Image: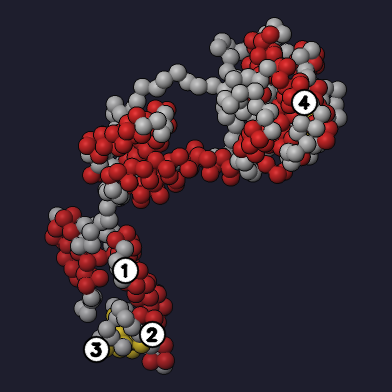
Amino acid sequence: MGRSLGVTRRGDTFHLRKRVPARYRDIEGRDTVWISLHTDSESVAKSKADRAWSQMIEAWEAKLAGDTEDAEARFAAAQELARVRGFRYLDVGKVAKLPPEALIERVEAVPAQADKAEVAALMGTVPEPQLTISKALDLYWTLAREKTFGKSEDQLRRWKNPRIKAVKNFVAVAGDKGIENITRDDMLDFRQMWLERIEGGEVTANSANKDLIHLGDVLKTVNKMKRLGLDLPLGELSFKEGETRTRPPFSTDWIRTKLLAPGALDGLNPDARGLLLGMVNTGYRPSEGATLTAETIRLDCDVPHISIEPEGRQLKSQYARRVIPLTGVSLEAFKEFREGFPRYRDSATLSATVNKYLRGKGLLETPAHSMYSLRHSFEDRMLAAGIDDRIRRDVFGHRLDRERYGAGASLAHVRDLLAGLAL
């Protein structure tokens, strides 16, 4: 009866006897294995047989995983194999410092016919893989995940790409070395690469500094969250930046006679045209307009308005959440697009599409102008109309340079003020 279950007595102890499955023949030299169940009771042996076989399978799977040239896979397999045998993986130095009884326990746990993988797992001789710069980036996405909460797919892509670019640029200069091996010379070489590009007119100091910031963010986050305790050589590397360039505003006359001229925007796809017109009298950021929906476009009320909310995306700041009354051509545009602009809701191509069209049609007031210039123009028109600073900042989603008191102006009052400057 015992043999039918694979349980059989050898001397005073019951064993589980099983043929080695074909899957494990390459990493197990025996055709048949005998696993001691450490009991002289047949009923106890039968109750332990399934668990013993499961552990054997786990050990073989761990060996299979370790049968690779990939250092991380080998190390992970050694950790798993040690766990299956009931131990935590320790490197050989720590194993050697164990109390005698703990060391003897590990030695005795090595099966009589153990191969190199099992000995290495229990004795800690599998080297821990080096945490390279590229591996640090892989870790960073998980360690910094709180920074991604609430981001849309497009926002997540735009958040990731600069960090991927920074790491790629650094690896091209210093190699994909372990982060503990990054030297001050590596960082200075990286800075020198950017200096040469700045001197050659390829990039601005601002672009170089962003790369340094993103690289530092990845390395410092991994160092902190993985408790590596490294003294990273990241200080005093930034470049002095020149005057910040801002997009100039469109003049009111240019908007009225060029952008809003009959037929001027007919060649734009409807969603892009609607978003541009919606921006004229609201000054929203293009990404804010693109994510508006039927729930945040509110026309059937006393004061038609849009509500900028963190719906499927992360707002630029806490002040960006706001309502903006609709007036003039912007109100007319939203009457046509009550459901929003699905074409651009999860796309980053809006500004590029609009700017290409405006440039091709000669509708940019100067080469420095862009779609975003409509936001600056709207702010200038509010300023020229003498609208209070608190109201301007509330409409624009900007921080107020003093404490906010009260709820601010009513939506109807703001609508009446903006109606006077609407185009």
Q: Residue at x 72, y 43 (%)?
A: 342
Q: Residue at x 47, y 20 (%)?
A: 244
| Residue under pointer 2 | 22
Where residue 77 appears, as percent x and y from the top left, is 32, 65
Q: Cα distance, mark 4 to mark 1?
A: 65 Å
Asked whether 298 or 96 is in front, the reply is 298
| Residue under pointer 4 | 260
Q: Cα distance, mark 2 to mark 3?
A: 29 Å
Q: Residue at x 35, y 25 (%)?
A: 239
Disc 3: CA contacts within 10 A as few (<14), some (14-19) or many (>=20): few
Going from the N terminus, do you reach mark 2 or mark 1 first? 2
Which of label 3 and label 1 is nearer to you? 1
| Residue under pointer 3 | 11
Going from the N terminus, do you reach mark 4 or mark 2 first? 2
Going from the N terminus, do you reach mark 4 or mark 1 first? 1
Give the image quarter of residue 82. Answer: bottom left
Quarter of the rendering occupied by the N terminus: bottom left
Give the residue type at disc 3. Gly
Location of residue 420 with respect to 263 vertically, above or below:
above
Residue extending furthest toward the top: 386
In terms of secondary structure, where does tag 3 sit? loop
| Residue under pointer 1 | 68
